[in-house]
Image (spheres, coloured by chain):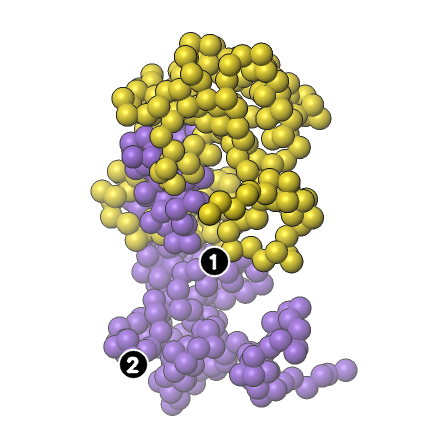
Chain colours: A yellow, B purple
Amino acid sequence: MVYPTSLNKAKNYFEKFPGIGGKSAERLALHLLNMSLEEIEDFATSIKEVKTKLKECTICGNLSEEDICSICSSSTRNKNLICVLEDKKSLFAFENVGHFNGVYHILGGLISPLDDIGPENINIKGLVERVEKLENPEIIIALKSSLEGQTTTLYIKKIFEKKKVEISRLSYGIPMNAEIDYLDEITLDRALEDRKIISE
Amino acid sequence: MVYPTSLNKAKNYFEKFPGIGGKSAERLALHLLNMSLEEIEDFATSIKEVKTKLKECTICGNLSEEDICSICSSSTRNKNLICVLEDKKSLFAFENVGHFNGVYHILGGLISPLDDIGPENINIKGLVERVEKLENPEIIIALKSSLEGQTTTLYIKKIFEKKKVEISRLSYGIPMNAEIDYLDEITLDRALEDRKIISE
């Protein structure tokens, strides 16, 4: 065997992580040697705690160490404004931007008939229940622009059709700094469709 | 804070690893949720063991759980043939190829006057001591083609000048599958210098 047993074992674990190949796994495992024993023990504890301490917020599905996450329990967030997301990672992305003052709802997937994922397989029921309790609900659907994302967006739009709910979606368009001539046709077409009137 | 405490702590640790940025660290930390508790505990144990069990082979400097590594203690390896390497990673690379049947000597660095690293700061003394004990020693110097690599190569060559030691270095040249017209001039120049006569 090329690697000593313990190094090999750590390397094999690192290799199972997303986006980590054999060479990176070797580098990560070797980096452990540069860390102090205290750091390594603290690191080992932290990875165990991710598994043992975290659960899903019973309201929005966000990761939390409590039953209700810090966003849903915050008194400064607007509970009438719900941003609908596919997954937890999208929530972190929104929070990293830091401009959104409403709350979230994580679907945990997108409707995809080809993969046998219907509306009942994602948390749409929870969204309906939440919205029904609100007085002036507003929903922002922030799903990706794929076929599945658009199907799910339209489905949610339809559910609330007869209810007094303001529903919007994120605009499709040109990403910042992208060269127009390198954009794919669909993006360009959508950017045209979603065009905004320039106000003075 | 965007992330729950325990996730944030694990993410921060992953971010300290080489080549891992904020986004990758988030993905690695989130991947822990997909692992079973048993797997995570085994992973945590394995990273601790890398630190607690591994030491440097007293002969060659390779990582080992014993005082003498499996290569130096193997009866099938040619102890008269020593391949001189900069670091442990290079050793793994050679072993992964699997054609080299000699033993190794890890310098733990390269001579670099600019960084105040002299011959006494890397393990050249150990190499001299090893070679002196051998009857028909042969040394292959396998260092990178940088200025530091070449300086170290020439220095080792000079030390053994008056001793009966066969010394070679890896050839410089065209990497496999590289396009000639994309190669830098120095590589091309070296490939010309190191040219091989084509035998029938």
Give the quarter of the figure containing the C terminus of chain B. Answer: bottom right
Q: Is residue B160 left or right of residue A187?
A: left
Pick whichever of labels 1 and 2 is earlier in the sequence.
Answer: 1
- Report x, y in % for residue A16: 50, 39
On residue B92, which mark appears?
1
In the displayed structure, A6 sits above or below A87; it is below
How much space separates mark 1 and mark 2, taking CA atoms? Answer: 27 Å
**Quadrant of the drawing holding the N terminus of chain B:** top left
Looking at this rendering, what residue extends furthest in the bottom direction? B162
Relative to the observer, which residue lies in front, A54 or A2?
A54
Q: Which chain does tag 1 point to?
A: B
Residue A91, visible in the rendered structure = yes
Q: Are marks 1 and 2 in contact (CB under 8 Å)?
A: no
Q: Give percent across and percent down for residue B37.
A: 41, 25
**Pair 1/2: label in front:** 2
Indicate whether B183 appears above or below A31.
below
Q: Secondary structure at mark 1?
A: helix
Q: Residues within 10 Å of mark 2 (few under 14, many from 20)?
A: few
Which residue is located at x 29 percent, y 81 percent?
A: B113
- Which residue is denoted by mark 2 in the rendering? B113
Q: Mark 1: which amino acid?
A: Phe
- Disc 1 crowd rating (10 Å Cα; few below 14, some 14-19, many 20+) is some
Under mark 2, the amino acid is: Pro
B20 left or right, relative to B95 = left
Q: Position of residue B154 (x, y in %)?
A: 41, 84
- Given residues B59 and B192, the one toward you in this image is B192
* Label of residue B103 in the image: none
Which sits in the foreground, B93 or A172? Answer: A172
Q: Residue at x 46, y 14 (%)?
A: A131
